[in-house]
Image (tube, helix red, strand yellow):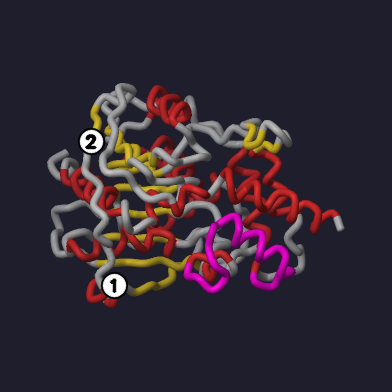
Amino acid sequence: YILLYYLHHYSHLLHVFFFSMIRQPPRSTLSSSSAASDVYKRQVSTQSTGNSEAMAKRASAQVLLRDSSGSIDYFMAQGTSPDLPPIVMVHGWLDSWRGWDQVLSGLTFLGEWTVYAISLRGWGDSDKVGEYTIDAYAADVLHFMDALAISKAVICGHSMGTLVSTAVSARHPDRVRGLVLCASASTLDGNFVLDPGTGLKIKDLVQTGQFLEAGASSVLECEPSVREFLCEFQEAEGDSEIMRETFKADPRAVGESWESMLGENHSCELASIQAPVMVVWGTEDQLFKREVQDELLQALPSGVSFVEVEGAGHDGVIKDPKVTKVVIEAIDEFCRTLVDE
């Protein structure tokens, strides 16, 4: 009864405050920010970045985890230009490597980039074993690079993946050519109030993991009411590609990774990052708002590029085909500046 009350009471609230941005239509231009030392201003194109021929060439494979307890699933597209740095993409909470579909489609279409996108342990088709923490995920990214003989790469993270990416960049600067942070923050403020009327805070969402069935091997095996709640949270239909990936997740990963994020504060570490950085933010991001971006930019070293995507939300900045063309162009341009460094 407590579970049902929580689901019915909060699901609509989460829908409104967290993911309403995914279906927001993009506006016509991008605004600039004085907080960043280098600001990209771009026009938003409504043309989809999907390309059936390019996406037909996509393939996934698996590599053993560093403790050999299982394996992680990943996508790879071999580029035609050996001079360009490889790109490793790290997904956000409730996602897998397929959360990058729109961006991967665009970069694959360009053909020059060698791109990897991994599903962290506990998510997608990766094995459900071990610890689901930011530190463990950062170690897994490094092991992945070692296993595929990637000495140095551009690390590109989204949401939770940005915390993983900044951990890798700050602690292992010799492995990072550049850093791209999409929908990012220096820390996840657990006391941020989503609804002043009810007092709902970000830290309250750790219960999302706590009420998932402990005995279920995936979210798909949980009660229908739980699956319906997560569909509301993702603003996606139950039979959509987004939810098919979410339903593969280890219920333990859902709660433990969120709890780990709440314990992360990279404010001090960010200043030690040596690689060039680009921050990508959607103006309709209701989780990491503009003031959060200002704090992030202040914590990072000088010279950060800031891409402000008008009308894009927290997830939409990499998933909405009406705006991801802008993000693809920004990643392409940013990474090309790293060739001679």
First reached walking from the N terminus: tag 2 or tag 1? 2
Q: Is residue 232 above or below residue 308?
A: below
Q: Is residue 211 above or below residue 64?
A: above
Q: Position of residue 260 (x, y in %)?
A: 62, 43
What's drawn in magenta, residue-wise? 220-241
Q: Nearer the viewer, residue 121 or 63?
A: 121
Question: To which residue does mark 2 refer?
Answer: 40
- Is 225 inside the magenta-drawn segment? yes
Q: Is residue 250 visible?
A: yes
- Residue in view at x 46 percent, y 29 percent: 269
The chief SS type of the magenta part is helix
- Residue in view at x 64 percent, y 32 percent: 193
Q: Is residue 240 above or below residue 110?
A: below
Q: Position of residue 72 (x, y in %)?
A: 48, 65
Disc 2 secondary structure class: strand
| Rendered-image quadrant of the N terminus | bottom right
Q: Is residue 141 visible?
A: no
- Please state which amino acid type lies under the numbered disc 2: Tyr
Question: To which residue does mark 1 refer?
Answer: 55
Q: Position of residue 144 (x, y in %)?
A: 41, 58
| Rendered-image quadrant of the C terminus | top left
Disc 1 secondary structure class: helix
Relative horizontal placement of residue 125, taking residue 78 as reference (left or right)? right
- Please state which amino acid type lies under the numbered disc 1: Met
- Residue in view at x 47 percent, y 47 percent: 21
- Is 127 inside the magenta-drawn segment? no
Q: Position of residue 320 (x, y in %)?
A: 38, 56
- Rendering quarter of residue 38: top left
- Residue in view at x 63 percent, y 64 percent: 250
